[in-house]
Image (cartoon, helix red, strand yellow):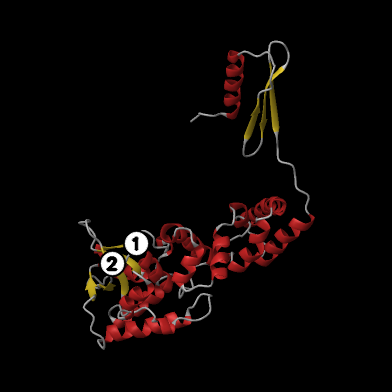
Amino acid sequence: MGNKGFGDRLADSYVESARDRPARGALPTDSVVASRSSAFTELATGKVVNDRTLWVDPARCRLWEHHNRDQALLDEVSCADLIDSFKAEGKQRLPAIVRRVKGDPDVDFEIIAGARRHWTVMWLRSHNYPNFEFLVTVLALTDEEAFRLADVENRARKDLSDLERARDYAKALTLFYGNKQADMATRLNLQTAWLSRLLDLAALPPEIIACFADPRELKVEHAKVLGPLLRQPLAARKLLAEARDLADAQAGSLAAGQPTIRPADIVRQLQRATLSRSVRPAAVIVDEWQSKSGRPMMRATRGQTRTTVVLPTRSGATRADLVAAFAELLDRLKVGEG
């Protein structure tokens, strides 16, 4: 089903119409919030009658498997605004978006958007408000449509970091768009350049992420600077060597309760390292075995990520000699040990 069909199906429930979508490719939060709130308010106040919006048992709902909300972060503090609002109103005003689940006797719906609302209703039911129900709008959605709908919701969220959003997009690129960035950008109404920067952020190696005291401090603009450097082999080696030092320094500061390096300073240091830092040679161990005639019959060069084995010709070694030497190498590498 194309974009128009999906848009038509959502327009009568809550998603922004095509004319509301911003022209810019950055995260369009303002029009999303305005149009969503307006549509939901009409539904909740009864101005619009929609037989797909109903009250359900929250215990019969589960999060969609591709939902990016970290449930571990939901608590009385992060959901305090909803708890207070639901208590004051006596009910939930803004419906969550769900789709029906088939074949599971314990679950009727999976939540596409509205995890905080669901958590809040569940919390209230277990804290002296047993009659609270979960307001939902039920839609029939494919996984790709569900992702796009959740993406609209996510753009209005202030608690979702750039890195979390970038990883969500990277996963969706493979799952729903066949690794075709242009197709994904079109479907999500994003500029291709913006999507590319988000994917660069998701692809940052762990050495760089470890440089930041809090990974949520990583921003799209950081990937815009570091991404091109990482695509240059020599610059990447220098950058990663500096990153390991910075990560160690950050870890030490955190352990000692001292101030950590600011994100902007981290990026500047990583940039400077690609221009001035000499690359430290990788640690290498060379093992050599000789045949009974005293000639080299096998040489193993062990680095950080690989081991290279060379078998010189005319060494006079027998097959049994080589097998014994290789078995000794495997023992040194501890290959096959539990």
The tag on residue 332 is none
Is residue 259 among what the camera can see?
no
Is residue 82 found left or right of 203 in the rendered image?
left
Q: Residue at x 38, y 71 (%)?
A: 149
Residue type, label 1: Trp
Residue type, label 2: Arg
Q: Earlier in the sequence, mark 2 or mark 1?
A: 1
Q: Is residue 107 above or below residue 1?
A: above
Q: Residue at x 23, y 68 (%)?
A: 57
Residue 217 image point, x, y percent: 58, 65
**Element at label 1:** loop
Residue 184 image point, x, y percent: 47, 66
**Element at label 2:** strand
Q: Which of 269 and 88 is in front in this view?
A: 269
| Quadrant the N terminus occupies | bottom left
Badge 2 crowding class, 10 Å Cα cut-off, few under 14, some 14 to 19, many 20 or more, is: many
Which quarter of the figure has residue 213?
Answer: bottom right
Residue with the mark numbered 2: 99
Q: In this view, does 170 lie above or below 51?
A: above
Q: Which residue is drawn at 70% across and 16% down?
A: 314
Residue with the mark numbered 1: 64
